[in-house]
Amino acid sequence: MRTLSVIRSLLFSLMLMALSAASFAQIGISVSYGPPALPVYEQPICPGDGYMWTPGYWAWDGNEYYWVPGTWVEAPEIGFLWTPGYWGWGDNAFFFHEGYWGPHVGFYGGINYGFGYGGHGYEGGRWENSHFYYNTSVNRISNMNMGRKHDRKPRQLQ
């Protein structure tokens, strides 16, 4: 009985690793012209503690760009932050660089998505002692049981 349990656990672990590897696979999309300007929109109120803002972006359907709205998403791990995707120019075309979760915010094209993503880094909040502290100067946070807040104006782009 114990052997069967160990085998099930190993098979489950292998399946999870295979799915994880597949999720990192990227399909290259190139477009001859750039996406439209980012629209101005109001950020919805954060639904609860532990959610991170993932900004909206322009996606390509094979014929034209379409807007994918930003949304609040629970971080997959404590300490993880979202690096937004972006369209970058190279080899005579625009290529989309997928966003990803990680322990720090990486390069996202210098694009000012707003809501703490000013073109470099992230000023929408910070992890401290396994808790996320929201920057209320750039995020819409209600007063619902979210005592972990701070109010720091983002630095200006230069």
Image: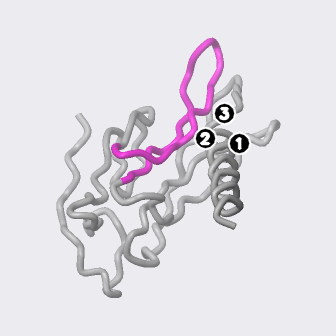
Identity of the residue drawn at 57% across and 48% down: 57
Q: What residue is shown at x 36% (from left), y 60% (from top)? A: 78
Dot placed on the residue nearer the N-terminal end, 3 or 2 = 3
Point 44% across, 36% down: residue:
108
User: Which quadrant of the figure has residue 91?
Assistant: top right
Q: Secondary structure at mark 2?
A: loop
Asked whether residue 19 is drawn in magenta, I would say no
Q: Are marks 1 and 2 in contact (CB under 8 Å)?
A: yes
Q: Nearer the viewer, residue 145 or 114?
A: 145
Q: Is residue 114 left or right of residue 66?
A: left
- Which of pointers 1 and 3 lies earlier in the amino acid sequence? 3
Residue highlighted by disc 1: 65
- Residue type pointed to by label 1: Tyr
Residue 36 shows which numbered tag? 2
Residue 87 placement (x, y as % from top left): 56, 33
Compute the Cα span from label 1 to label 3: 18 Å
Estimate the x, y position of residue 101 in percent, counting from the top left: 46, 48
The span picked out in magenta is 80-104
Q: Which residue is mark 3?
A: 26
Quarter in which the C terminus is drawn = top left
Circle 3: element type: loop
The residue mark sitting in front, 3 or 2, is: 3
Rounded to the nearest angstrom, the CA distance separating label 1 from label 2 is: 8 Å
Q: Is residue 76 visible?
A: yes
**Which quarter of the rendered picture does the N terminus lie within?**
bottom right
